[in-house]
Image: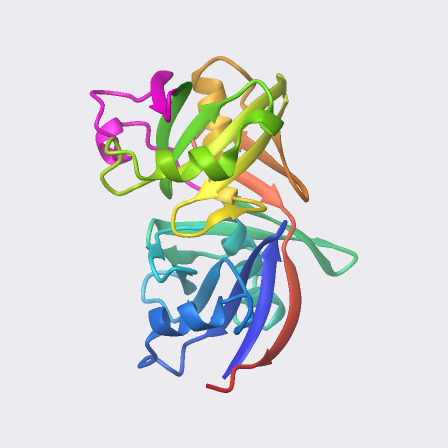
């Protein structure tokens, strides 16, 4: 079976075109493929499928076999693949995801894909919808893990995220506090955890502990959630650069339609054949 290795700023995936192989156990396959010693190695798989409500459907499965509703870095790489392989024929199209229909726009420069801008829809800041066991909105609440108390904000941009503000990322200890917060009883469906250092009104730095993956080099929905959380807590403007380990995502939270727009690169690394 043919695959393509893709990534968005280091958040990497194995992409399969599953339109003609509907009977495959994608969860079992994902666990084998994503192993970094005996498989291709990735944070998860992206499965390209037909859609009855959009131009194409994207299914996202994490390395541990759990399924994600949405992935910001994944949809940019997925969109570039779909465009460059003639699966969609316009630079703007609709992708069905578990979090609803997303609308990416492929950005071309001299006929080549330079990046992808995605309309991620409206953020959901209702605590019950995240979900987090707090009344009303979970904005700026104290969250304690292993004796350390953080200022946290929980919201949903496709998937649940908890933004934890820190003075310095190098003191955040993401591998330690990330899993503790992910599995905190406050979050009945677990949560992605984003540690955010505010540099100035238009610039933040972020590291992410992803639910079902662990530490990843980038998280697109996390960058969107971080930008929204910064605005809700009065820390930045509505247009902000989110610096992660291998680059920067630009996030705009529109005043006009309340949608979050994410712009960033997408890379197709190599293709191969999975022999199992």
For the record, the magenta segment spans: 120-147
Visible residue check, residue 223: no
- In the picture, measured across the screen, residue 248 lies left or right of residue 161, that is right
Taking the magenta stretch, the answer to whether it contains residue 139 is yes
Residue found at x 51% / y 55%: 74
Displayed quadrant of residue 28: bottom left
Q: Position of residue 241 (x, y in %)?
A: 63, 30
Residue occupying the far top of the picture: 234
Which of 2/262 is in front?
Answer: 2
Residue found at x 51% / y 87%: 275
Displayed quadrant of residue 248: top right
Give the answer, above or below, for where 82 lies relative to 210. Answer: below
Give the answer, above or below, for where 60 lies relative to 235. Answer: below
Q: Position of residue 67 (x, y in %)?
A: 34, 57
- In the picture, measured across the screen, residue 111 lies left or right of residue 272, that is right
Colouring scheme, one of rainbow, by chain, secondary structure, one colour? rainbow
Q: Position of residue 179 (x, y in %)?
A: 39, 40
Which of 263/198 is in front?
Answer: 198
Residue occupying the far right of the picture: 110
Which of 207/50 is in front?
Answer: 207
Residue found at x 52% / y 43%: 220
Residue found at x 59% / y 46%: 217
């Amino acid at each position: 079976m043919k695959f393509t290795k893709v990534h968005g700023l280091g958040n990497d995936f194995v992409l399969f075109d599953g339109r003609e192989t509907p009977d495959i156990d994608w969860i079992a396959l994902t666990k084998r493929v994503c192993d970094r010693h005996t498989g291709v190695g990735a944070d998860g798989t992206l499965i390209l499928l037909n859609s009855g409500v959009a131009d194409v459907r994207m299914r996202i499965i994490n390395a541990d076999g759990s399924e994600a509703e949405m992935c910001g870095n994944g949809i940019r790489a997925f969109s570039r693949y779909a465009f460059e392989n003639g699966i969609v024929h316009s630079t703007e199209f609709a992708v069905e995801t578990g979090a609803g229909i997303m609308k990416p726009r492929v950005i071309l420069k001299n006929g080549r894909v330079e990046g992808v801008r995605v309309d991620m829809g409206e953020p959901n800041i209702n605590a019950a919808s995240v979900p987090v066991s707090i009344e009303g909105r979970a904005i700026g609440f104290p969250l304690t893990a292993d004796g350390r108390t953080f200022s946290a904000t929980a919201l949903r941009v496709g998937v649940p995220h908890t933004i934890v503000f820190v003075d310095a990322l190098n003191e955040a200890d993401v591998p330690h506090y990330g899993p503790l917060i992910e599995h905190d009883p406050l979050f009945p469906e677990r949560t992605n955890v984003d540690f955010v250092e505010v540099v100035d009104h238009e610039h933040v730095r972020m590291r992410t502990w992803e639910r079902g993956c662990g530490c990843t080099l980038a998280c697109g929905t996390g960058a969107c959630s971080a930008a929204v959380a910064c605005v809700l807590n009065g820390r930045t403007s509505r247009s902000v650069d989110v610096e992660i380990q291998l680059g920067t995502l630009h996030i705009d939270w529109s005043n006009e339609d309340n949608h979050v727009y994410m712009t960033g690169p997408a890379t197709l690394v190599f293709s191969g054949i999975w022999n199992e």
